[in-house]
Image (spheres, rainbow, N blue to C red):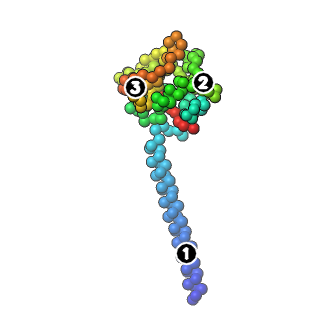
Amino acid sequence: MKELKEISSNYAMERSNDLFSQVVAKAYADGYRQGYKDREDEIPVDLRDRKIEFVDLGLPSGTMWSADFEKDGNDIAYVPYEKAQKHEIPTSEQCAELFGNCKFMKKDNLFYCIGPNGNYVTFALLGYKELDNEQATYTVASLFWICNDNEKNNNTARLLDMRGITKDTYKEFTGNKIPIRLVRKK
């Protein structure tokens, strides 16, 4: 009889370990999926599908700039400021750092922004779209939204081709639709 008790006890222990392991594994998988979904909802840009390329320009802060403007399918995405600020757009300080530390040259309707380490990104001549107009108003400038975080209340960066290259920021009507560039830290 003692053998049967030992056998049944061992059997119960094994079965409960298996059952406990299954419960813990399921809880782990459910938690992982829920955490992934929660994080996915927080990510302002889907980095997995569009494979956004960031370029290290060798800036002192370690800020990397996206290689291109954000796209909507194959087209440049034009968005009002309210939508732009949900993305990781540059701050006015990051924009000033870019303008101050990089060399700019214009060739073939592109501004080349060459970082201290020799890497570069390009900025196309893009305009803006007015609030109720889906047709872009083109200019001799490359515009992109920046965070509205300074005392001057500027929220647009501009690379302008007016007898040379002018780099500045200015206040833009937040309902107009302007392209965006993304930034991230190394």
Mark identifier at residue 13: 1
Q: Which of the two labelled residues, at mark 2 and mark 1, occupies the earlier sequence position?
A: 1
User: Which amino acid, by three-letter code, is at mark 2?
Assistant: Ile
Question: Residue at the bottom extreme?
Answer: 1
Mark closer to the observer (2, 1): 2
Q: Position of residue 55 (x, y in %)?
A: 59, 31
Name the residue located 50 percent from the left edge and 32 percent from the top edge.
182
Mark 3 neighbour density, 10 Å: few (under 14) some (14–19) many (20 or more) = few
What number of labels is visible? 3
Name which residue type carries label 3. Answer: Lys
Q: Position of residue 71 (x, y in %)?
A: 50, 29
Amino acid of disc 1? Met
Q: Of circles 1 and 3, which is in front?
A: 3
The residue nearer to you, when weighing 116 against 129, is 116
Residue position for label 3: 152
- Point out the tag, 1 or 3, that comes first from the N-terminus: 1
| 78 or 121, nearer to the observer | 121
Is residue 167 rendered to the left or right of residue 82?
right
Q: Residue at x 57, y 89 (%)?
A: 1
Q: Position of residue 75 (x, y in %)?
A: 49, 26
**Separation (CA) of disc 1 from disc 3:** 70 Å
Asked whether 160 or 140 is in front, the reply is 160
Residue placed under numbered mark 2 in the picture: 114
Q: What element does badge 2 sit on?
A: strand
Could you say which is closer to the camera, residue 180 or residue 30? 180
Residue ID at (64%, 28%): 117
User: In the image as oriented, which residue stretches furthest toward the right?
Assistant: 118
Q: Is residue 184 visible?
A: yes
Rendered image quadrant of residue 151: top left
Residue in the picture at 50% in, 64% down? 23
User: Mark 2 Cα within 10 Å, few/some/many (few <14, many 20+)?
Assistant: some
Q: CA distance from mark 2 to mark 1?
A: 67 Å
